[in-house]
Image: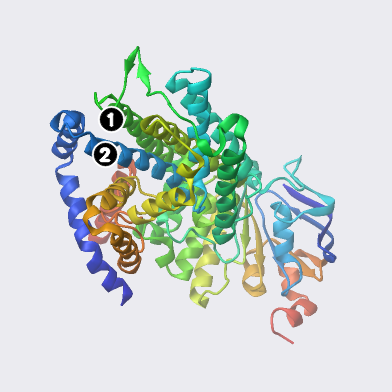
Amino acid sequence: MNDIKQKKNFNIILYLEQFIDRFKLPLAVSSAVLLLIFPHLLTNQYILTIVVKVGIYIILALGLNILTGYVGLVSLGHAGFVAIGAYTASLLATRLGLGFFLSMLCGMICAGIAGILLGLPTLRLSGTYLSIVTLGFGEIIKTIAMNWDSVTNGTLGVKNIPSPSIFGLKLTIANGGFYYLMLVMLLIVTLFCYVTYKSRTGRAFLAIKTDEMAGIMMGINVTYYKVLAFVLSACICASAGALYASLIGYIDPNTFTFDVSTMILSIVILGGMGTIRGMFIGSIILITFPELSRSLMDYRFVVYGLILVLMMRFRPQGLLGWKSQMPYKLSKSITRKLEQARSDKQENLSQ
Amino acid sequence: MLKIENLHTYYGNIHALKGIDLEVKEGEIVSLIGSNGAGKSTLLSTITGVAHAKSGSITFKSNNITNIPTYHIANTGISISPEGREVFPALTVEENLRLGAYIVKDKKKIEEGYERVYKLFPRLQERYKQTAGTLSGGEQQMLAIGRALMSNPQLLLLDEPSLGLAPNIVLLIFDLIRSINEQGITILLIEQNANMALSVSNRAYVLENGTVSMSGDAKQIANDPRVKKAYLGQA
């Protein structure tokens, strides 16, 4: 009964998937062209800033997706990793004058270490227990940023964070350079997530998510892969944090509140845990919605909540749900063997 | 091949295994029977490193594998089909098998593995794209065994393969166990269904309260009056 009901819901998605699958190439080319010339189409910096913000949140969601979507560990403290990335990168840039990319890399390394420190003691935890611990982690990082005056400048925050520059060319929103920087980073992170998911590591993540004990029996070192997921997730979020800091030019402890963590998690859940395309859709909806609905004033967060509630009721697996609706594709060599086996069988029957 | 000497395992204060000696020789099917709480599953989890042995030794092909980390077990050539099947319910049959071959890096060997499993279990081939959770109990059991075979093991540990299955499916599963053995894979079979287990095995061990109370030729054990009374339901 339930099954039949759900199938009806799926249909739109299935048609969409089939449509996308059929016109894969033209769609890919046209959207790539559109993305490339986008800053030249409009001169409105406000819109471009929002688009860049959407991109940053896609990177954040892809980061959390490794932990929550692939391994099934729900984290409510990812703002902590974002803060570590943003603070490390902007402090190195403002105080030591390091370049953007070098300081971002340092931020990622720091966040990775924090990922190990958070991942190791929480190995045995899952579900709500893990969420509470990660929630605490996010708060700890925020409190450290607030009280470590000599380094982080406390509640006053870090000011005048320089924009990134390549070969002396400053990348700002005004000249569109920042947009392209975001695009390149997004591309790298997306490809990284895709390759990880398809690899041996991705299979290990999947096994841990579905049945940890059976995974161990198959020879998967669960400790290693769980910590690895924490580290990868932290590094990706830290890179987005560094990008965000240099976009806004100013950060303080209140930039990285619990709201940021819940926002990232909402994107992951709304888009569809474990998918890559879902992160794109989720960020686009959740980040642009508050901007589009400014006319609703304060009520917009009521509508916002309503969207999430409705989605949980009608599509709990996320907009672009966990499993594809398209028929499962096998590797060619196996398909060939299967077909051969089937025709052999038929020959036997006809004889 | 597998040799267990004077093995003691505790769960906290509970002395679960009280000095087990057991040997599985290459090419054999050895069954381990016993009632609930006799220590069958504890013995299996001690072999696989899930439970820790307090003393005694487990050797596999002259390597000491006592208390090795569980994820290393697959690399030694031992493969497990766990109790209660434990397939990955959300993944397809194909993906389940792929995960079984997790430690195999050679793509050709993985293809061979698929072929071998599909030959043994044509039913799995028919359902290769179905999620494992939607399979029947018997099919899930086949999948669990198939998944264990994907890593190309020398020793296969089967924990209660007949659990919760219809009698005719149980017959089928035991038939398959025999044909897996004929392919040269040694099998240690842990079973409550003593009758079936003894009929396919070469040798058998009877566990009682954490000790081996009887061991020897499977037929001999099947004819032993004590076993008949305790496990086979005959006076």
* Residue B20 occupies quadrant: bottom right
Percent position of residue B69, x then y = 69, 46
Across and down, in percent, residue B21 comes to 82, 57
Q: Position of residue B15 (x, y in %)?
A: 84, 65
Disc 1: CA contacts within 10 A as few (<14), some (14-19) or many (>=20): many
Can residue A18 be seen in the rendering of this structure?
Answer: yes
Taking depth in this image into account, of B146 and A262 the one nearest to the observer is A262
Where is A286 relative to A192, above or below? below
Q: Residue at x 28, y 24 (%)?
A: A177
Q: Amino acid at mark 1?
A: Tyr
Q: How many marks?
A: 2
Residue bearing mark 1? A179
Which residue is depicted at the point 18% across and 41% down?
Answer: A24
Residue at the extreme top: A167
Please provide percent x and percent y for residue B30.
69, 59
Q: CA distance from mark 2 to mark 1?
A: 8 Å
Q: Are marks 2 and 1 in contact (CB under 8 Å)?
A: yes
Secondary structure at numbered mark 1 = helix
Of the image marks 2 and 1, the number of the one nearer the N terminus = 2
Q: What colouring method underlies this structural image?
A: rainbow
Dot 2 falls on a residue whose secondary structure is helix
Q: Nearer the viewer, residue B235 or A44?
A: A44
Q: Which residue is mark 2?
A: A51
Residue A247 appears in which quarter of the rendering?
A: top left
Have a look at marks 2 and 1 and say if they share a chain: yes
Q: Quadrant of residue A190?
A: top left
- Left or right of residue A51: residue A25: left
Residue at point 24% right, 53% down? A294
Q: Amino acid at mark 2?
A: Val
Are there few (<14), some (14-19), or many (20+) residues within 10 Å of tag 2? some
